Image (spheres, helix red, strand yellow):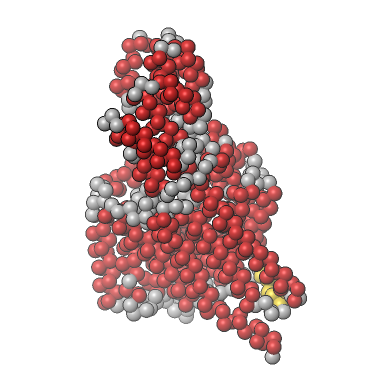
Amino acid sequence: MQRKRAEQPSESLKPVLGPAMIVVFIASSVVGTLAGLRNSSPSDFYREAIAEIGFIGLLWYWLYRNRHRQQVTITVSYTRLWLLGLLVLASLSGFWAVSPDFFVGKYLLWLAAAAVVVLTLTLQPDRNLMVGLARGFTLIGLYIAIVGLVQALLSIDIFLQAAPPAANFNNRNAAMQVIVLVFPMIVFGLLFDRHPVLSKCYGFALALVLAYAFYTRTRSAWLALTIEGVVMTIGLVWLKRRSSPAAGAVQVNWNIGHQLAALSAALVLVLLITLPSRGAGFGNTVAYVVNSIQHDASSYDVPVRKRRPERYRIWDSALAMVKRSPFLGTGMGSFFYNILTNPHDAYVFSVLRVHNDVLEVAVELGGIGVLLLGGAIVGLLCGLSRLVRRGEPTARAFFVLVAAALAGSAVNMQFSFPYQMPVPAVMFGVYAGLVIKSSDAGNARRRTMVLSLKSWHRYAGLTVLGCILALVVSVNMAWMNVMDVIEDNVKIRTWENPIDSTPLQCPRGIVRALMSVPAPYRGFGLYRESQSAVESINNCVPGTWLAQQETIQNLLKQKQFEEAIAIMEHARHRAPVAIFIDYVNLIFAHLQRGDMQAARRVYEELRDKPIKLLIQRKMTLRTLILFALRTGRMDEASTFRDLYLIHYPGDKKFAARVAPHFQ
């Protein structure tokens, strides 16, 4: 009798486990609202904290409620083994990771996704779960779309974010990563949700999500949504034709109310995408996306020195890291650390992610990690193939749409970073868990083992998972503080190596506002007022390089060259990568003082910097050309002029200005 009572909680918790997971999904998605309004730490890390604490906590609670079970059934299949191998390799990479802090931050995200897979494997993938998942994911997509459309159409950056319309994800690419995974679930709800009211709302949700996707102008997401549309159309048409009479056809509720709702939603979509947003109408937006895709596709073979698009430069940096550690990589979370600590060895600066998830796995876990990932993908594809060919029609349609979601996300992950973010990563965990659980039911190659559990086994397992949960909570707090410093300092481009920097003392929005004050005062000759604003900036960011630049400009305008030179000598060693304005100003100041020897010394120091850094800004190359011409160094002037013509061919005015010197 006691044993029966002990096993009862497991069954009582199952019906609420799915909704509880949806609640954590929604909380992880909308947390950016509060983070944006506070304008402090990046909302991505709040999302990670909620996802990690929420899903690992749910897993711990699930095991706690089953702590009296005497046996556990373990199912072994190839897909489970590939995913387990990938997680084990990620765990072991902590021993060779280049940074323990960055390893822990990334590894906890993977643990959250793993917890979601385990939780999903405990659920029964029936129609109720599928519809509930569609409703929850639709709510997430609808929230993102509404906030993003307000930003786009009303030009209101509600959450003080970058790259509007960013919804509440701080970046429109990140927001679209979620939309790509949500979109097929909205279609499932539209076709199969039988609720008398909700079933008529999916069309409007679909219209708003597509309108938001249109205004983001995110090329990889447009391509991903197109792929999803093709897969859904082909899959559902094929399924309808192949449905046997015995199994029953795919039943779709579609009455006059649904028809009117669908027509209204279509009109809403047409209206939204034809409204002008920030000066760009429908035609301009489509032309921009098409032209940018054509430009980037045609620039694949362009050398790095000829202004290759940023994506290719990021991938070049990542490939260089892979070549240095081809088998096991440099450990979880290492890409961002490598970029920050070795900026002169990279073609980009302060890029958080590779913008190709497969390549990021290669950087962090090497070729072995990519092999394990490939095995898991093949296993999921085989499972999906079995699920869409047999079973109940609605379930088959559901897995057609899951296949579409994963296909679209697979395309998106080649150009973006969905699985380096918390919400897409845990959504993938749900999809993967559902595919594994459902496909293993009829998989002849699976193996099932029943293990007997002793009391100390159960409590030891709960204790270990509880310690992990406590670690997640404590590490997340510390990690968000670390990333707060790094993100803020990188975004205002204050230090060359942001890891050892002083944190902001004021919210980022105040710092940005103060940064815009000194220049207008200086333009009206109000140097004292301008310097007063600089002191306010220094109070927010002690010793910031940008504030020093404002001080330098004030001194140069007042011809106080000695004081300006003293500050520039110190500031140039702390400038961001490829920012050589201090060298340029030093040359100018020495020339104004008539000290040609000092100006020549600064020129030679600047001249010897890596070419890939010198070509980043027009001003740097212009200064090198003009000073070389002034001092009669024609060979050097010719070299820098050739670089200028290659990288800035549109600046014909300057080219014409210096052309007579080379005839």
Asked if one can make out residue 313 in the rendered structure from this viewpoint, the answer is: no
> Is 565 located above or below residue 441 in the figure?
above
Taking the spot 42% from the left edge, 62% from the top edge, the residue there is 30
Taking the spot 37% from the left edge, 79% from the top edge, the residue there is 195
Report x, y in % for residue 121.
59, 70
Looking at the rendered structure, the number of numbered marks drawn on it comes to 0
Image-based side of 142 in relation to 613, left or right:
left
- Looking at the image, the residue that sits furthest to the bottom is 1
| Viewer-closest of 563 and 274 | 563
Q: Quadrant of residue 641?
A: top left
Report x, y in % for residue 221.
40, 53
| Viewer-closest of 169 and 357 | 169
Report x, y in % for residue 81.
66, 61
Taking the spot 27% from the left edge, 76% from the top edge, the residue there is 257
> Is 479 located above or below residue 202 in the figure?
above
Report x, y in % for residue 317.
54, 38
Image quarter of the N terminus: bottom right
| Viewer-closest of 219 and 481 | 481
Asked if one can make out residue 118 in the rendered structure from this viewpoint, the answer is: yes
> Is 658 located above or below residue 91 in the figure?
above
Taking the spot 71% from the left edge, 73% from the top edge, the residue there is 458
Image-based side of 640 in relation to 99, left or right:
left
Image quarter of the C terminus: top left
Image-based side of 471 in relation to 258, left or right:
right
Q: Quadrant of residue 616?
A: top left
